[in-house]
Amino acid sequence: MSTFKFNFSNDGDAPADNIDKANEQIVWLECEEVTPNKQIEDIEELLAHARMFACGDVEIGHVVATEALNKMYTGDSEFKNAVELAEKEHKDLVAGKYEGGLKIWECTYDLIEYLENLTGIQFENKKILDLGCGAGILGIYTFLKDASVTFQDYNKEILECVTIPNVLLNIEENENTLDIKKCKFYSGDWASFNNKLEDTEVFDIILTSETIYNTTNYDKLIDLFVKRLSKDGEVYIAAKTCYFGVGGGMRQFEATVEKNGLLESKVCWKSSGGILREILKLTKKM
Ligand SMILES: C[S@@+](CC[C@H](N)C(=O)[O-])C[C@H]1O[C@@H](n2cnc3c(N)ncnc32)[C@H](O)[C@@H]1O
């Protein structure tokens, strides 16, 4: 996995004031609910793009994201231009335009392994939010354990071409119209998503992987956790300890959580080699 890189012209560590200036200029996208109609008709086509995500005993079907995107979006679009720019400049994302959802990131594997082997959490009949879902592997994992799942990704195109097809690939053929109705899909910025949901909508478990790289988003994330977590709910954040060149990381995020004062945080897993990675658990303070 490459080092996380923003859309700055200089490689390596981007100076903090460059990051701040770039963030100030971003016009974050508004939240929209995305409905899975077209993808249900195209299920045969989707199977032609299927691959397997494998992590221990867990296996989840998924499409090859770039192939699926190119097939569905043939014309020019701001999103496709941003993806092409990221590819050309060997970046992981273009802030505010494309936020990295085409790839399956390595902390997703950490969180699946952790949930599968170390927590004993029962997902049946639970309300789950897969926040910043990309391919949606975390949400699909819980969906297969009979949870009802809300999938959120910044880019509508990712939900349409990747997340929704991936959910459909993991549903029994005859049951896809009915079962996919148990899932909801939202695009756009976290602040706008938080505002769009009904005031009473809360989740038992919020799962999120590789979403704390940009410190600009920390207050939005924490506000969302405070408002959308049920009384006894739990948030699991899988992330790198430090995102070089971007400014974010676990310690900065923990410090912002502490400053907010409404959530308890605890590191519940740490990697033992390679790039340092962790899982942070948040609960509401009593
Ligand atoms: C690096 S990708 C991780 C994708 C996926 N969770 C994984 O681990 O494979 C970061 C994800 O966070 C989401 N994201 C980033 N910034 C966001 C923002 N300001 N509002 C909403 N979603 C955002 C994007 O949807 C993107 O898919």
Image (cartoon, helix red, strand yellow):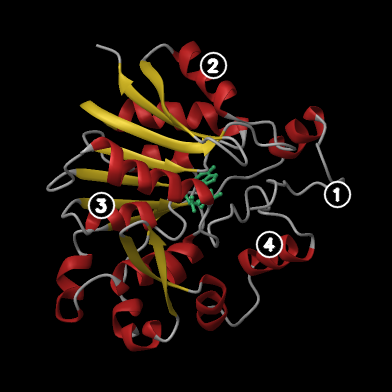
Rendered image quadrant of residue 227: top left
Residue holding disc 2 = 255
Left or right position of 233 against 269: left
Residue holding disc 3 = 142
As measured in the structure, the alpha-carbon distance from the residue carrying label 3 to the one carrying label 2 is 29 Å
| Neighbours of disc 3 within 10 Å: few (<14), some (14-19), many (20+) | many
Three-letter amino acid code at disc 3? Thr
Left or right position of 32 against 249: left
Task: Looking at the picture, tell me which residue is in the foreground, 191 or 265.
Answer: 265
Three-letter amino acid code at disc 4? Ala
Q: Residue at x 50, y 11 (%)?
A: 259
Q: Residue 280: x, y in percent?
A: 43, 29
Rendered image quadrant of residue 274: top right
Residue holding disc 1 = 9
Q: Residue 44: x, y in percent?
A: 33, 88
Q: Residue at x 75, y 49 (%)?
A: 7
| Neighbours of disc 1 within 10 Å: few (<14), some (14-19), many (20+) | few
Task: Say whether disc 1 or disc 3 marks the residue closer to the N-terminus.
Answer: 1
Q: Secondary structure at mark 2?
A: helix
Tag on residue 82?
4
Q: Secondary structure at mark 3?
A: helix
